[in-house]
Amino acid sequence: MTTRATPAQKRRRLREGLASGTLQRLPGAFSPLAARAVADHGFDGVYVSGAALAADLGLPDIGLTTLTEVAGRGGQIARATDLPTLIDADTGFGEVANAARTIEALEDAGLAGCHLEDQVNPKRCGHLDGKTLVPAADMVRRVAAAVKARTDPDFVVCARTDARSVEGLDAAIDRAKAYVDAGADMVFPEALKDEAEFAAFRAAVDVPLLANMTEFGASPLLSARRLEALGYNLVIWPVSSLRAAMGAVDELFAALRTEGTQASLVDRMQTRARLYDLVDYASYSAFDRDLFNFEIPGSAT
Ligand SMILES: C[C@](O)(C(=O)O)[C@H](CC(=O)O)C(=O)O
Ligand SMILES: [Mg+2]
């Protein structure tokens, strides 16, 4: 209800951010409520992780989720804020024609952009061993189809290459250049090993670059400040909020089992007041003043 920016305005904002020379910081949001928190903390955009979306459904990240599920959840998350939302479109949910339809669906859902990767199906998390890639020529067709399918020229098509850990750094750079020639607006070099490789990619590729700062992976956790100095344009922390939340959920359930009460953990929980703030309870009194005319117990406000 509080969201006023249109999808077109959000896409423009992402484009301007990528052209600004300032690193765009996009934490992953596993739900619309988490996206509200991303916005409230003053980030530049929201990221929707395929791994987190699958995990939230109790599934591994091997391409089991469908375009309908991903576009549906992505749309709910995109709608929750005025920020641009970038979504993980895995391999594009099929062959070349499917990649085109994927862009149509994601655009219709209000996303600002997506990334498509050059793995075969079943795909894997980019930081695991045993990945297989499609030939570069096939991915070029995938990217070209995606670019052609968009109706808003500001929708960002980002090409991810998983080649670093399969074919080596040079091959990954060659693939990235071919994807840029096919029309990719941004490149996501997956699973780079160290800072020197991040720098090598920056030196070789002319379009905006995305850095994936996922935990327990192959890449070092470089800070936003460091990535900006390296010339990167956008950073994602894709699964961090889910891992943090689920870490807290595990602790809570352990306490409930052993102590029979959550009392020892209440002071680390999000308060009722903060939750109501994020869902903007107060603004609904524009329609009906009886909806927000109570005192929250224990709250100063
Ligand atoms: C970015 C990613 O594609 C995702 O789905 O969030 C994953 C993240 C992860 O598994 O940690 C990836 O890097 O493959
Ligand atoms: Mg993914």
Image (cartoon, rainbow, N blue to C red):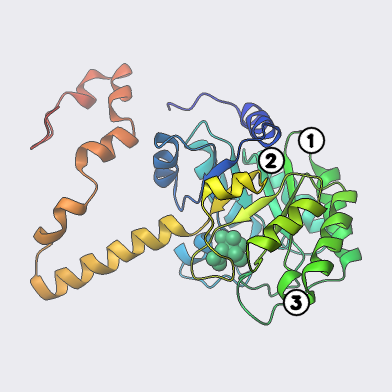
Q: Which residue matches tag 2? A: 107
Estimate the x, y position of residue 84 in percent, counting from the top left: 58, 36
Estimate the x, y position of residue 173 in percent, counting from the top left: 82, 61
Which mark is on residue 175?
none
Structural distance between the alpha carbons of marks 1 and 2: 8 Å
Q: Quadrant of ligand 1?
A: bottom right
Estimate the x, y position of residue 93 in percent, counting from the top left: 71, 62
- For image coordinates 63% across by 66% down, the residue present is 194
- For image coordinates 72% across by 63% down, the residue present is 91
Q: What residue type is labelled 1?
A: Thr
Split into 4 quadrants, where in the image is the N terminus?
top left
Taking depth in this image into account, of 122 and 108 the one nearest to the observer is 122
Q: Which residue matches tag 1? A: 151
Q: What element carries label 3?
A: helix
- Work out whether mark 2 precedes mark 3 in sequence or the reverse, and give the earlier one: 2
Q: Residues within 10 Å of mark 3 (few under 14, many from 20)?
A: some
> Given contact means CB atoms under 8 Å apart, are the residues at marks 1 and 3 in contact?
no
Estimate the x, y position of residue 3 in percent, counting from the top left: 48, 27
Q: Which residue matches tag 3? A: 166
Q: How crowded is mark 2: few (under 14 residues within 10 Å), some or many (20 or more)?
A: many
Q: Is residue 159 visible?
A: no
Taking 241 as reference, is 208 above or below it? above
Q: What residue type is labelled 3?
A: Val
- For image coordinates 40% across by 63% down, the residue present is 243
Taking 66 as reference, is 15 above or below it? above
Q: Which amino acid does label 2 sit on?
A: Glu
Structural distance between the alpha carbons of marks 1 and 3: 34 Å
